[in-house]
Image (cartoon, grey):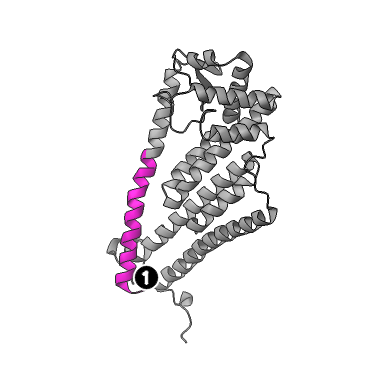
Amino acid sequence: MPFLAVPAARRVAAALAPRHAAWLLAAVALALAATSSAALALLVVPGASYLPFVAVLGDLAEPLTVGPPAVTVGLALAAGGLLLWRTPLLVATALRDRAELRRARAATGGTADELAVLRDDRPDAYALPGRPGRIVVTTGMLRALEPAEREALFAHERAHLRGRHHLLLVAAELAALCHPALRALRDPLAYALERAADEAAAADVGDRRLAARAIARAALATKAPLPGRPATVLAATAGPVPRRVAALLDGGQAGRPVLPRTGRLVAGALLLCLTVSGSAALQAANELHTHIEIAQGDTEAAPAPR
């Protein structure tokens, strides 16, 4: 289902307002990551029931008979290997992201102000989450923009902090480690988050052209991100800037599909994929529960003989 749902999610997200698109993509990533992980876990249990200590823990009188033993054990080994490989990777990624954020906050000098100015000639600016969140900007970026453009840039980064956009990006990053198909959702999600911040900045400064000019000039000035910038932070200079500027200048309609009927069909396909994925996991869990009761010697749970 993830291989079918991801293309549908990207098509549907392109038809929505940026904020709604971001939430849709993040929700799809988390839902598919959860169901695919549940599928692996459900495959492990029958094969693990052949191990004596697992049988004792589950009060099993016999192994779970859900198929030929060779197939059951083989699938359990494959699924267990994937889970064992992926779990430390998830933990390591979460710890790495947290350490990067801590180092970036330490580099701001512990200021309590919303704006943290780094003395660096290389232009850069980004939203650094935390308590409180900070807008990090270099002196090089301040010199590259006019005062009104700086306000638009700060409004963009402030929108990221206010919306806690980094949490959605982290969720997509971790979900991509759970299933390879989900990696294709990260870039569209990052684009939707930047577009949401673009629209918020334009509303705050009351001038869409000013917001577009500020983003364009900031992107042209930024040659490369600062070495200490965390991977999970968001910045006005990220993503396809020309496409974002065009969307601001034409009222946010750039890239929107012109066939609403097609959009509804794709949305229906996405909903069907998510429903099938979730219902399949629930059905498999219910069947596994029944097999466990049978293996525990519960004759009432056993199916009637034909």
**How many marks are shown on the rendered structure?**
1
* Residue 299, quarter of picture: bottom left
User: Which residue lies at the image location 68% right of the left edge and 23% below the top edge?
Assistant: 205
Residue 132 in view (yes/no): no
Farthest-out residue, right: 206
- Assess whether residue 251 is covered by the magenta stretch: no
The answer to which of 197 and 210 lies nearer the viewer is 210
Q: Position of residue 216 (x, y in %)?
A: 57, 26
Q: Position of residue 215 (x, y in %)?
A: 58, 26
- Specify the amino acid type for callout 1: Leu
Q: Secondary structure at mark 1?
A: loop
Q: Is residue 8 above or below residue 299?
A: above
Pointer 1: what residue?
A: 64
Q: Is residue 5 left or right of residue 56?
A: right
Q: Which residues are magenta?
A: 64-92
User: Which residue lies at the image location 55% right of the left edge and 35% below the top edge?
Assistant: 165
Q: Residues within 10 Å of mark 1 (few under 14, many from 20)?
A: many
Q: Is residue 131 above or below residue 183?
A: above
